[in-house]
Image (tube, coloured by chain):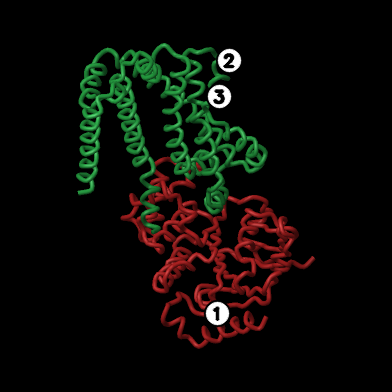
Chain colours: A red, B green
Amino acid sequence: MIETPVKPAPLLDVAGLQKRYTSSGTLAIEAITLTVERGEFVSIVGPSGCGKTTLLKTICGLLHPSAGRVTLDGQLVTAPPPQMVLVFQDYARSLFPWLTVARNVAFPLRKKKLSADAKRRAVDDALAAVGLGSFAERYPWQLSGGMQQRVAIARAVAFQPEILLLDEPFASVDALTRAELEDLTLRLRDKFGITMLLVTHDIDEAVYLSDRVFVLSRPPSVVVREIAIPLPLPRDQEATRSDARFLALRNEIHHLIGAR
Amino acid sequence: MRRRLGTVTVVVLLAVWEISARLMHSVYFPPASTVAVTFAHEWFSPLFAEQAVPSLFRMFAGYLIAAVLGIAIGVLIGAYRPLFRTLDPLLQFVRAIPPTAIIPVGILLVGIGDAMKVFVIAFGAFWPILINAADGARGVPRERLDTARIFGIGRPATLVTVIFPSALPGIFAGLRIGLSLAFIMIVVSEMIGSTNGLGYYILQAQRTFAIPEMYGGIVLLAILGFALNAGFVLVERRVLAWHHGEAARAT
């Protein structure tokens, strides 16, 4: 027998995923196949209403697929696995307003078998990493929208997942904050080595952040194309966005989404 | 300024009461000053322990039972949709019963002692607390529940750490309605079958033509009700500080 060099198995493997809403019978997702390698930053872009949130919820095990399967680290996903965290678009609804920022971040650690000291350190580290070290004792609703989303991201990071699913996390903040949060996400990937899977309808954002982009069709969704983003790292808001290749890539995706 | 305006209103009304009562000379309508003198004489005495304390004790006992059961069952019903769908029609029907109508049932079941009063007070206060707790638990944003699931928090822990705090604004709305109902129920139940308590005292004063005493009893009820509500608001402000803060930010 000839030994063929085998590519290491992808961290996340989504195979023929289909989702039909049980209540209405509508087919939201026709069939989606994609993989995410360890340490990769992958984005999924598509027209609004293409079932992006449904896709992420199904990938992370909050919803059951109608067909196909999701495997994480070789394990079939049937319920939210501990190595995966989903960050919602609506931070105001996903954060707990009765808890301080520090307690919000500490909330998921209750399930982890860590000493009180280790927990405090995890919370401090996560808050420092998102630049909210001095806001630990505030309440989320005392902070701006961008800061609240950072709290949600810190909470996810403190949980130490292998992969972070981001559901349009920057859609409810202003453009300047958005750019800040994008760069923050890139830094977090480098600092903690977390794999990122982002869903967005913002093509520029997808190109700016990602190593690879999957373009979805209108519902019932399928993957229209997979596009590698060979832009140099680290990315820079000005340099990257004015790169000719950046523009070519965004135009290509724009065309793909617009044409369907 | 606002406070001063309120004080002026009270003073003017008391003056109108005083003057009109003195002009009318009716036994049934004593002047405010007479009521005040009687009030001071009656209530700054062991009578408070004899008549007011039993009322307050029954009310707190009944209210506590209603609060514990109402919150626990309400949150459970609200959290589990099938339970809610199964029980909601029944709950809506039973809560429509005016709680005063349950007094004869209470007398039949547990006699006319303290148990009956505690029972009817608990019954009256229970429903609004239950319904509001259930509504609060039902209205938890999807994302909050999903967040708990994503972090592997089990159902029972989610109930305590996510659903219950989320339902607190609803719970307090119910507790507030429950408190005023408990207050009504204590007076009514003591008027129907009792040998002491404020309801008994007021009715007894009326029957024996002790008219200033009757008004004095009513004034005492007003003062107690006011104090209870003020105490409630104090607790609510503390417990729901986050909710008020959030709501103030949203507008």
Q: Nearer the viewer, residue A15 or B13?
A: B13
Tell me the number on the disc at residue B108: 2
To the question of a shared chain for discs 2 and 1, the answer is: no
Residue A24 in percent (x, y) is at 72, 59
Residue B54 showing in the rendered view: no
Q: Residue at x 50, y 44 (%)?
A: B162
Q: Is residue A52 left or right of residue A187?
A: right
Q: Which residue is mark 3?
A: B102
Chain that bears disc 2: B
Q: Is residue B193 above or below residue A127?
A: above
Chain that bears disc 1: A
User: In the image, which is nearer the foreground, mark 2 or mark 1?
Assistant: 2
Q: Secondary structure at mark 3?
A: helix
Residue A107 in percent (x, y) is at 46, 46
To the question of a shared chain for discs 2 and 3, the answer is: yes
Which three-letter amino acid code belongs to the residue tagged 2? Leu
Q: Which residue is mark 1?
A: A230
Tell me the number on the disc at residue A180: none
Which three-letter amino acid code belongs to the residue tagged 1? Pro
Q: CA distance from mark 2 to mark 3?
A: 10 Å
The residue positioned farthest toward the front in the image shown: B24
Q: Quadrant of residue B209?
A: top left
Disc 2: CA contacts within 10 A as few (<14), some (14-19) or many (>=20):
few
User: In the image, which is nearer the foreground, mark 3 or mark 1?
Assistant: 3
